[in-house]
Image (cartoon, rainbow, N blue to C red):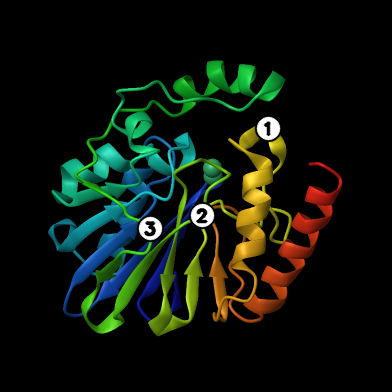
Amino acid sequence: MEILPGVHRVANAVSTAYVLVDPRDGLTIIDAGPGHFERTVLRYLTQIGRRPDEVRRIILTHRHFDHIGGARGLRDATHARVLAHPLDAPQIDGSVPNAYPKGAMGAAMRVAVPLLFPFRPCPVDEMLVDGQSISLGELGELRVMLTPGHTLGHCALHLPARRLLIMGDALNNATGTPVVSFDAVNDDTAMANRTSIALEGMDVDALVFGHGKPVLQGAPAALKHAADKARADLARGA
Ligand SMILES: [Zn+2]
Ligand SMILES: [Zn+2]
């Protein structure tokens, strides 16, 4: 559904993608969900009267299976360029096996994920650079922000024209309160906490997430709450 003008949210039970629709530039897809999610995104494009060949780029916030599984299918269907950060790209293009969470959860996922969400490696056509601006036409600039910790190459995307921060999994809103994800799924939780603190005070109104409902108003309070928790967790040595 369209949550802000030109900003569409496409979700299933596992993960969420966003589609930016610009009248001049075309379409930008952010994240690709788990394996087979390309079908959900392509069906959504049909529903809103858009064509796959209008997609200009597919930006992957990070390398986790629930964000990249549909990337290859979307790239094949749209012929769009795939963009990701160089620290996460090797797991996306398959040159390095993707890592699973630590502990028992990771062991279970190592078995279950390939069965439920078959992954096809996807070429990364362009490397994201921290601070880079991608020009979207009437939606203005989309700013790439390296937000490491959840993964080392995790990037959030700032759309000033909509006062929106597309968070990926830099914060997770699955519980209804945006916070840094739990330790087992992070590359470096202390780093993710420092990233959360750095995001406090961003001049935005709205936040959207890979997991959980959007925060369409009151982003500063949500970012402050997350940063306060991150500071407390760092002080505890978490
Ligand atoms: Zn993730
Ligand atoms: Zn995720």
Which is nearer the eye, 153 or 165?
153
Q: Where is residue 48, by image quadrant?
A: bottom left
Q: Is residue 171 visible?
A: no
Residue at (40% x, 20% y) in the render: 97
Q: Secondary structure at mark 3?
A: loop
User: Going from the N terminus, do you reach mark 3 or mark 1 first?
Assistant: 3
Q: Which residue is mark 2?
A: 147
Foreground mark, 3 or 1? 3
Is disc 2 in contact with disc 1, using a CB cutoff of under 8 Å?
no
Residue at (24% x, 40% y) in the render: 124
On the image, the x and y values in percent for residue 9 come to 45, 64
> Is 164 rendered above or below residue 178?
below
Q: Is residue 169 visible?
A: yes
Q: Is residue 104 left or right of residue 131?
A: right
Q: Secondary structure at mark 2?
A: loop
On the image, the x and y values in percent for residue 144 come to 38, 62
Which is nearer the eye, 171 or 22?
171
Three-letter amino acid code at disc 2?
A: Thr
Q: What crowding class fits label 1: few (fewer than 14 Cα within 10 Å), some (14-19), or many (20 or more)? A: some
User: Going from the N terminus, do you reach mark 3 or mark 2 first?
Assistant: 3
Q: What crowding class fits label 2: few (fewer than 14 Cα within 10 Å), some (14-19), or many (20 or more)? A: many
Q: Which mark is residue 184?
A: 1
> Mark 2 CB in 8 Å range of ligand 1?
no
Q: Is residue 117 left or right of residue 181?
A: left
| Separation of residues labelled 3 and 2 (CA atoms) | 9 Å
Q: Quadrant of ligand 1?
A: top right
